[in-house]
Amino acid sequence: MGGYEAVIGLEIHAELKTRSKMFCSCDASFGGEPNTKTCPVCLGLPGVLPVLNRRAVELAVRLALALNCRIAERCIFHRKNYFYPDMPKNYQISQYDLPLGLGGHLDLETEEGPFRVGITRVHLEEDTGKTVHMSESGRIHGSEYSLEDFNRAGVPLLEIVTEPDIRTPEQARLFMQELKSIMEHLEVSDCKMEEGSLRCDANVSLRPRGSSGMGVKTEIKNMNSFRALYRALDYEISRQREILENGGEVVQETRHWDADANVTTPLRTKEYAYDYRYFPEPDLVPLELDRGFIDEVRSSLPELPAERRRRFREEYGLPAHDAALLSSSKAMGDYLESAVAAGAPPKAASNWMLGEISAYLNARGLEIGDLKVTPDRLAELIDLVEKGTVSVTMAKSVLEEMLESGRRPREVVEERGMAQISDRAELERLVEEVLEENPKVVEDYRKGKEKALGFLVGQVMRRTGGKANPRMVSDLLAQRLGGGS
Amino acid sequence: MEELHQAKAWELMEMMRRREVSAAEILHSVKGRVESVEERVRSYITLTLDQAERAAREADKALAEGKDPGPAAGIPMAVKDVLCTKGVPTTCGSRILENYTPVYDATVVSRLRREGLTMVGKANMDEFAMGSSTENSAFGPTRNPWDLERVPGGSSGGSAAAVAAGEAVWALGSDTGGSIRQPASFCGLVGLKPTYGLVSRYGLVAFASSLDQVGPITRDVRDCALLLSLIAGHDPRDSTSLEVELPSYAEGLEGGIEGMKVGVPRELMQEGLTPGVRECVERCLSLFRELGAEVEETTLPHLDYALSAYYIIAPAEASSNLARYDGVRYGLRVEGEDMLEMYGKTRAAGFGAEVKRRIMLGTYALSAGYYEAYYGQAQKVRTLILGDFRRAFERYDVLVSPTSPTPAFRLGEKVEDPLAMYLSDVCTIPVNLAGIPAISIPCGLEDGLPVGLQIMGKVLDEATLLRVARAMEEAIGFRERPQVGRGVG
Ligand SMILES: [Zn+2]
């Protein structure tokens, strides 16, 4: 990094997982034909009034508490005024100087040790609709007209602003992963970046290492995945460093991450000095959150990822790295717990999940929720291995079939006649046969040629079409040969 | 004998239930009036006589079957064009909504529909309720039935003129700074601005959300009480609507005012009152005493700043409320080269001068760097005014003042002078800032024009307010009616 360090703050927007929108009873779910999930209220028709969705408030309080924020017992909504066609009222109901949550933090575990990111504020606001520009590029330039879809207009949105405590793209990515995981555990948001239910902008500036001042910052937008976040920050830091090292000055501006070209570019809109003319929303009464309500929400908070990680390490005896991976998404952690509850030893379940299963999911771009193999069937497969019914190699092949069909492992094993021969008498008979037929190899072994044993094991396996329990075969041979010398 | 279109709603209700008259006959009489005077008075933007006829038929059918069709049934009503009516154009007196038809009914409208609403039409108004004369309507002014050269007041001028001229028996208006009380006063009628939150604002097209209230314009206090009880009450669609148990407003009307304490705020009796207005109000003060009430001059010192605070707060809220009229989704659109030009052209063509003036005032007052000096300061003044009223109501049951410093002024007299026009609401505005209820009742004439007495009450104490108004109505004995121009009456 040379003589500079980066100062990064994030501004995150997450759509809350409520059934209805923030101020009306319209369906808040994703998708649907344009403008089918709308009503006079979320279309901003003349005369309509907002009515606050209590569930949105509860979810917001949940997250704010999980982020260790102070919850305002009385907060108010403000109108943020600006003209944009995706905003039906040309103002957004948001929060301004009295947000719902203030002054929290999130602790991260990094390879360099623990790391704390301050949370400036958490507040509630409404989402906007979506503008579709009718041009080949889908951009406004050159489009003949644009269409508006208000299905998302009025969906409750949580805004989370961090302190500028982040120093590297890796920390930013870690923060986002942990935040996403927390929101999943709390069931407050779907956190799908591709559907826009989780969005992240970043403020980036550089300053001489050791200085506590703040350099000129740029705001980076359009980072649609964790990978994009990492790469955009990485790019922007190098860009700014290069400018500063050449004696130049960073321009304060908003820049757009172009994932195809791997660069950030200044947004080409005209520069407006936006004045949002915030003022208290007169159509809503102040939101009073009494202690009792806050305590109730607090006591109903589920286990958070950090706690789960600790439990996976301490109770399941998993290595820190595995515990972290398995608790990074709620679904992964839930899967592991279900498999363990179905009898699987945690370490074995963890190995299968982080090995074959993760490889399968990654190769196909699937998520754990898409998996056809249920946790109890994974447990059953592990049991077959533990009991010696199938070898690990065979189990891998059984799992392949299970991943495609979701069938029970026992069924697959029986159908394929894969059950391992672990019958001692049967194996002894085969061992005798092989020894008789290979006197020369036996002699070699006895002369100290260790490799000869492997050859003999291979011969037994061949006779059984690979079904002999290799460990037993190996033990029997060693016993037989050792006993004879 | 008086004609049906001149009767009070409660009289007509009783007559219908005694089968002395049918809803069809009442409507016929009102329709006749519309035919003979509407061309000169121009109370309505949209007439809905077909709907009214259907409602009247249903009322008669129900009565014939011995069922109660509801208190609003068969009583022809004018509804201010600021209230959304499903399937009936709702223009707010603006070019920008000239072709706009709502897909839903305002809560007050749907409540009245359940009670048999017989709507004659949508009444004319100052554009987006901004004005005190109904001259700011994009569809031309309404004239005062008492003198066609004069304004009916505003912004609910169409509602008041319709009731005064016999084109409706009662009406709904909306009041942000006096828009029910001042036209009621100018037209010799009773007009009530309820406590903020008593009547739902859902479907009332917003001017200034923290000040707007819907209320009745009627021929007497009993009608006012009846109509109030039909529209008041909690609405889950309006977060600012209050959850309170409602008294029966009509029941306690005759209770009298003996022993009550009446305060007269000095600040509302200052310069600017015409001699006739002063005389009428002073006569009322004697009547209060005669009825056994104690009358005392008092002071609410911060009322002197009410007008200034109002002209910050109301335009600020309006600038935001009216932002949605942008040509994107409904209403007028004037095409432009790009979106910004379309916005500009649409709003330039769609809004009138007064609306533009207030949007600019409000935008300025909320701007970064000015917010504290204007909006912040105005809110502080509002809190002080509220405190003044609270203290006054510790001593007094009601406060009284003129409704307007003058009787109806001439058309065109104040159009070019916004400040003079704003001063017309100097007595009514403090009430909206404080959120308290107030009623205007006719209390005399000055040069043949009606003068209104404003009675202000405690929050949610409409019952006392109406009882006082009823006692004074009786004592004043105002019986005059407008002639609607020469030769027509
Ligand atoms: Zn909706």
Image (tube, coloured by chain):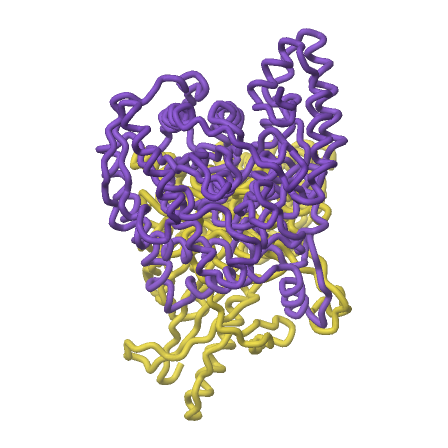
Chain colours: A yellow, B purple
Query: Residue A473 at x, y = what percent?
Result: 59, 42
Which residue is at the far top? Answer: B66
Query: Residue B450 at x, y = what percent?
Result: 48, 39
Can you say which quadrant of the picture contains the N terminus of chain A? Answer: bottom left
Task: Tell me if residue A235 comes above or below residue A19 in the rendering.
Answer: below
Which residue is at the far bottom? Answer: A247
Q: Residue at x 62, y 51 (%)?
A: B141
Horizontal side of A225 relative to B365 (left or right) equals: right
Query: Residue A21 at x, y = what percent?
Result: 56, 42
Query: Residue A271 at x, y = what percent?
Result: 54, 76
Q: Quadrant of residue B278?
A: top left
Q: Residue at x 55, y 19 (%)?
A: B10
Q: Residue at x 56, y 49 (%)?
A: B150
Q: Residue A426 versus residue A114: which sits nearer the camera?
A: A114
Q: Quadrant of residue B453?
A: top left
Horizontal side of B442 relative to B329 (left or right) equals: left
